[in-house]
Amino acid sequence: MIAWMYLDKLQAARDALRDYRDMARTAAIAPGEVGLEYEGMSAPAASPPAGAGPPSRDPRAGEARLAAALDRVDVLRERHRAASEFLGWFEPAWLSLSEGEREVLAEYYATGSLRSGANARMQARLGLGRAQVDRARQRALARLALLLYGK
């Protein structure tokens, strides 16, 4: 497809790295949130606090609450599905990288610390100069982009 020729694969790989932690968290917590929504649907409605006035006269109020809860469940399920799909695509490429490549990329992109001393921390951790750390970062990013998107 012609569109692949114009995709900035390095930027796309950077963006995927930035999304990785959020997607992993979403995939992990979404099923629990769905369970809480279902639990809330099965609990009886709480009585209004004293002095709050007469209860609602809307005969469909319970139905509206149930429909809203089902909508929230649908949203949570879709988020979980999207996060799982992302992880199924991203994690094999991520795990194909060496430990050092993952460490460098995580320091720069996954934590969002590109401009907050990431280079100095990597220089100290790896015992390399600034230019060497930059080259290592570029090689690791290029390798991840190749694994994710191909040539």
Image (cartoon, grey):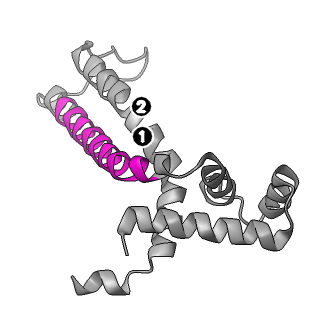
Q: Quadrant of residue 72?
A: top left
Report whether residue 58 is seen: no
128 versus 52 height, above or below: below
Three-letter amino acid code of the residue under disc 1: Thr
4 versus 148 height, above or below: below
**Figure quadrant of the N terminus:** bottom left
Report whether residue 75 is seen: yes
112 versus 25 height, above or below: below
Q: Which residues are magenta?
A: 66-93
Give the structural element (helix, strand or loop) at label 1.
helix
Is 136 on the left or on the right of 88, as rendered? right
68 versus 121 height, above or below: above
Q: Report the residue at 71% width, 59% height from top.
A: 113
Mark 1 surroundings: few (<14), some (14-19) or many (≥20) residues within 10 A? some
Q: Position of residue 28 (x, y in %)?
A: 41, 32
Where is mark 1, residue-wise?
Answer: 26
Q: Is residue 83 magenta?
A: yes
Where is mark 2, residue-wise?
Answer: 29
Instruction: Confirm or deny contact between disc 2 and disc 1 (CB under 8 A).
Output: yes
Is 45 on the left or on the right of 90, as rendered? left
Q: Position of residue 102 (x, y in %)?
A: 60, 51
Give the structural element (helix, strand or loop) at label 2.
helix
Please name the predominant secondary structure of the magenta segment in the image.
helix
Three-letter amino acid code of the residue under disc 2: Ile
